Amino acid sequence: MQRSRFQAEVLALWHLAWPILVGQMAMVGMAVVDVAMAGHASVQDLAGVSLGVSIWNLLMISVMGMLMSINPVVAHLVGAGQLSTVPSMVRQALWKALGVGLLALVLANGSVMLFDKMQLEPKVHELAIDFVWITSLALPMFAVYRVLYGYSTSMNQTKPLMVIALLSLLLNITINWLLVFGMLGFPRLGGLGCAWATLITVSFNLLALLWWMRRSPAYRSTWPLGQFERPNWTHIKTLLALGTPICVTHFAETSAFCLIALLIAKFGSLQVAAHQIALNFSWVVFMVPLSLGLALLTRVGQSLGANDPTLARYQSWVGVLLGMGFAVISAVLIALFSTQIASAYTRDAAVIALTAQLLFLASLFQLSDATQVVISCAIRGYKVTHTPMVIHLTAFWVFALPLGVTLGLAPGWMPFKPTKPMGAAGFWIALIVGLTIAAVGLVVLLRQVTRRAIVSHRVQVCSAKPMGTGAG
C-alpha cells in the first residue's frame, strides 16, 4: 500500500535523522551561546565576535564540505556489504583531513588581513583578530572529527554523535560563562572567552568520539585505527575529486553570507550585530533540513550500494517533501515571532528592531533554503557533486552577491540602484533570490540524476540476462 510505504520511509529517515538533528542543534547552539553571551557583554564584543565567527564559519563549513566525501563512499560500501573495505577508506580520509585542517589553519590566520582594510573600531578590530587566531588552532582537530562523524553516520550510528554534541554544548556554555563574564575567579575576557570555549569544545568532541568508537561493538568490524596505513594517493585523489566540489558548493553559499557581514561592517556595529543575530538564528533553523539531508544521503547511498536506484529515487523525493513541509512551518513561526527571537539575543532596542526586520526576510527564504540543502544531500548520495557546485556558484556569485551589492550598498557606478543604500536588508533580499535559483536548479538536476541511474540499472540488468531461445 502506497501510504504505508510512505510512512515507513518517513519513520526510517526520521530514525536516522533525529539524533543528527539534536547533535547539529547542539553544535550550532555553541555558536548561539557565543553570539548571545558576547551580545550581553557589549555591542563591541558582539561585533568583534560576529566578524571572527564569520571567518570561523566560512572555513569550518568549507572543511565539512571537503570531508563529506567519506559519507557516500562508506554508505555505498555498507549498502553493498563490503564492510572490509571501510577501514582503509576511512584511514585515507583521515590523512586527507590532516592536510585540509592544516591548510584551513593557515588560511584562517591569513584572512585577518581583511580586518585591516575595514573601518572598524579599535576594540572590535583587535577582538576579531584574536578570535580568529585562537579558533584556527581547532581546525585540524575539527577536520579529523568530521571524517569520523561521516564514517559514523554512514554506518547508521548517529546517537553517539548526539550524546557527544549535547555534552559539548554544556561544556561550551560553562566555559563561556566562566571566561566571558569572569565568574568564579576566572579572568573576564569578554568576547575572547568565546574563542577559548570553541577551541576546548572542539578538542573534547574529537577525544570523546574516539573514546566512544573504541569501546562500542558497533564499530568493531570497521574500526579504522586498528593499524597504521600510509597515504594512498589514488584513494586520496578519489576522495578529493568527490569532496572538492562539495567544498566549493559550501564555500559559495557560506562565503556569500560571510562576505555580506564584512560589507555591512561599513554601516557600523548596529548593522553588523543585527545581521549576525538574524544569520545565527537562521543557521539554527537550517539544521533541521540539513539533518534530514545528511540522513537522506546515507539512505540513498546505501540503496545505490545495494543496486536499487528505484528505491533511492523514492527515498530522495520523500526527503524533499519532508524538508519542504518543515520550511513552511518555520517560515510562519519566524515571521510571527521575529521580535521575540531578537530579544533573546540582546537587550539593545535598536538592534532588536533591525534584527526583527531581517528575520522577516529570513522567513521568506525558508522554502528555497530547505529544498536546496535536502536535494543537495540526496544528489551527493549518487556521488554527483560537480553540477551542484556549478548551480550554487551561479546562484550566489552570479546573481545573489551582485544584486546584494546593488541593493545593499547602492554604489555610484551602478546604473540601476536604490536611491539610498538598503544596508543589511538589501543583501538579505538578494539572498532570497540566490537561494530560489539554487533550489529550482537542483530540483531539475535531481530529476535527471534519478532517471539516469534507473535507466543505467535497467540496461545493466538487460545486458546480464542470457539470450533466450526466441520461441514464439
Image: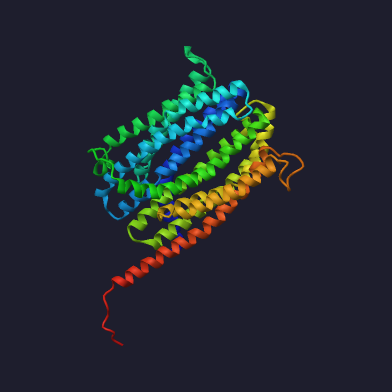
Q: 47 left or right of 468?
A: right
Residue 396 position, x and y percent, is: 57, 47
Q: Tell me: residue 43, above or below residue 258.
A: above
* Quadrant hosting residue 466: bottom left
Task: In this rendered view, identify the residue nearer to me: 300 or 138.
Answer: 138
Q: 315 left or right of 232?
A: right
- Quarter occupied by the N terminus: bottom left
- Quarter occupied by the C terminus: bottom left
How many marks the image carries: the answer is 0
Task: Report the colour scheme.
Answer: rainbow
Q: 36 left or right of 160?
A: right
Residue 462 position, x and y percent, is: 33, 72
Residue 87 position, x and y percent, is: 27, 44
* Quadrant hosting residue 257: top right
Of all residues, the one furthest to the left in this rendering is 227
Task: In this rendered view, identify the residue nearer to me: 235 or 311.
Answer: 235
Q: Is residue 132 visible?
A: yes
Q: Is residue 15 visible?
A: no
Residue 334 position, x and y percent, is: 62, 41
Q: Residue at x 56, y 22 (%)?
A: 126
Of all residues, the one furthest to the front in this rendering is 413
Q: 416 left or right of 152?
A: right
Of all residues, the one furthest to the top in this rendering is 185
Q: Residue at x 40, y 43 (%)?
A: 67
Of all residues, the one furthest to the bottom in this rendering is 472
